[in-house]
Amino acid sequence: MRRIVVVSALVAALMALGAGAVFAQDGSAGTTKEDGVSVIKAGNQRIQCTGVPCIATGNDDLVFERIGNGKQDRIILRGGDDQVRANAYGNDRDVIRGTSGFDLIYVDDGDTRDRIFGGKGRDKCFVDARAEAVAGCSRIIVQ
């Protein structure tokens, strides 16, 4: 009988921890520090791309390019106010395609081969050269 009570208490505690992790993951937007860089945490999903294409959810997502230099990414946004971080690895040609929403798109990775096709929203694009912002960027910041 005592084992049943202990196991039941353990299960309840683990369920409470799991629920807390879910609430923390779906929490509101905020700023965190990752790899020495301040990053705005999206309110819905944090997506680490692992394949091509990498497709966002349509909510407010924080999307990271695939890990490694020389890997060409194609990131497709599906609406929402997204943030794309394709600026950690260079020697590649990242292509970002936006739709609606007010997106922050970072491709300032040290090469000038990336291409941004923003959407209907007011996208802010951080690039190495103006030529990387092909269309849809209402504000272009050359880093």
Image (cartoon, rainbow, N blue to C red):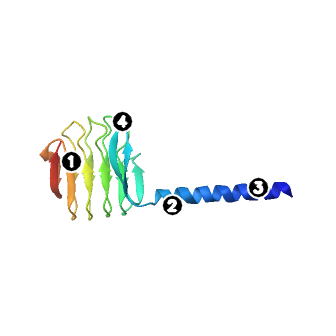
SS class of the residue under badge 3? helix
The label nearer to you, 3 versus 4, is 3
How crowded is the residue under tag 1: few (<14 C-alpha within 10 Å), some, or many (20+)?
A: many
Camera-nearest residue between 11 and 118: 11
Q: Which residue is mark 3?
A: 7
Q: Can the viewer see residue 133?
A: yes
- Residue 140, compared with residue 12, is above or below; it is above
Can residue 53 be seen in this snapshot? no
Task: Please tell me whether mark 1 sits on a helix, a strand or a loop.
Answer: strand
Q: Considering only order in the chain, which callout, 4 or 1, is on the residue closer to the N terminus?
A: 4
Q: Quadrant of the C terminus?
A: top left
Labels 2 and 3: the sequence-earlier one: 3
Disc 2, SS: helix
- What amino acid type is highlighted by mark number 4? Gly
Circle nearer the N terminus (1, 2): 2
Residue 33 as seen in the image, left or right of residue 105: right
- The amino acid type, in three-letter code, at marker 1 is Phe
Query: Which of the numbered marks, if any, corresponds to residue 126?
Result: 1
Q: Amino acid at mark 2?
A: Phe
Pointer 1 with pointer 4, Cβ within 8 A: no
Element under disc 4: loop
User: Which is more N-terminal, label 4 or label 3?
Assistant: 3
Task: Give residue 3's position: percent from left, percent from top.
Answer: 83, 54
Q: List the residue tagged with mark 4.
A: 68
Residue 94: image quadrant is top left
Residue shown at 31%/51% (left/top)?
A: 84
In-front residue for pair 93/107 = 107
Which residue has dot 2 on it? Answer: 23
User: Outermost residue toward the right?
Assistant: 1
How far, Cα to Cα, is label 1 from label 4? 20 Å
